[in-house]
Amino acid sequence: MSAPAAFSDIAKAANDLLNKDFYHAAAANLEVKSKAPNGVTFTVKGKSAHEGPIAGQLEAKYVDAPTGKRPTQKKPPDPGARKGRRISLLCGCGLRPVPQVTLFIFSDTTHHRIRLIYSHRPGLTLTQAWTTANALDTKLELDNNIAKGLKAEILTQYQPAKQSKGAKLNLYFKQPNLNARAFFDLLNGPSANFDAVLGHEGFLVGAEGGYDVNKAAITKYSAAIGYSVAQYSAAITASNNLSLFSASYYHRVNAQVEAGAKASWDSTSGNAVGLEVASKYRLDPSSFAKAKINDRGIAALAYNVLLRPGVTLGLGASFDTQNLNQAAHKVGASFTFEA
């Protein structure tokens, strides 16, 4: 029996239908993915917003999959023999040598070198990214290494220009009928967020809470209930300290058609109830179209097509149907290249 959905994913099917693959939010998106022979995956992302600067990110990720046998001891290669690809192995504190990958990143004024070091242990994943905000992000994941069903993440961030540092620890624990998570911000606060979901035969019950160590106070709490099967799902959530209520419904009509709706009410802002409906139609195995509209008259359309293996194009637009003569409409496009 598989574990139930995480607390944030209790209404995932409806939320994805309503929010995912609508490309008008940005004027242009570009994503390029490639995988090196040594198993390191490189991802380059660029985003041009309708207003504001262009944002980008360079990411490298290595997943150490189980091999069933321990690696053999090898003499470290000459650092100059394959410069920029594979350099010397590291050894310290009595540990055996481990592989090491080096990324050379260039900016306008300085030469950055990011080293991606990974130990040969099954279930280990290392991801490093450098963004146009000049932030260096590192994520180390250990899945099923500490205990069965337990995944640990260590996330760090460093901004050289601001001398800003961040460190977080995330824990995920999955068992049949249970999905629990804990998120610790080690430098800010410190603070902690917890959530847990119990599931039985499609029924889900979950709760979320936050705690600030310095203030010794609960910072937030939420609750949710839901029901999910293969063809449809429904959920009711109460977030923002039980002040924002939402009800969502998702239905897979058939292999080509999906439909969903979501209603929300903020008890602190008035009696108005927000409503949003969306639908997705798969035109053929390589393309689909989506449409949605909300109670304010904002309509959005999207089209996604696989041009060829590894090349995906997405087009989107949104219109204010109550003010068609005003410049409130948005158009966007997305390209994804994967090797």
Image (cartoon, grey):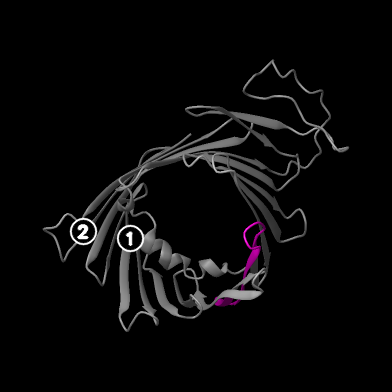
Q: Quadrant of the N terminus?
A: bottom right
Disc marking residue 248: none
Q: Say above or below: 20 vs 8.
A: above
Residue furthest to the left in view is 325
Q: Nearer the viewer, residue 246 or 278?
A: 246
Left or right: where does residue 223 sit relative to residue 167? left
Question: Would you name the residue on which mark 1 appears?
Answer: 280
Which residue is drawn at the image coordinates 66% and 18% (left, top)?
82
Relative side of 88 to 246, left or right:
right
- Amino acid type of disc 1? Lys
Residue 286 among those drawn in magenta: no
Q: What is the magenta range?
A: 183-207
* Quarter assignment of residue 192: bottom right
- Across and down, in percent, residue 187 comes to 65, 56
Prevailing secondary structure class for the magenta stretch in the rendered image = strand
State the residue at coordinates (42%, 65%): 15
Q: Within the magenta stretch, is there residue 188?
A: yes
The number of numbered badges drawn on the structure is 2
* Residue at the spot of label 2: 319
Percent x, y of residue 214: 67, 68
- Badge 1: residue crowd in 10 Å (few <14, some 14–19, many ≥20): many
Residue 120 spot, x, y in % from top left: 75, 39
- Left or right of 261 in this view: 320: left
Looking at numbered disc 2 in the image, what kind of residue is underneath it? Phe
Residue 80 shows up from this direction: yes
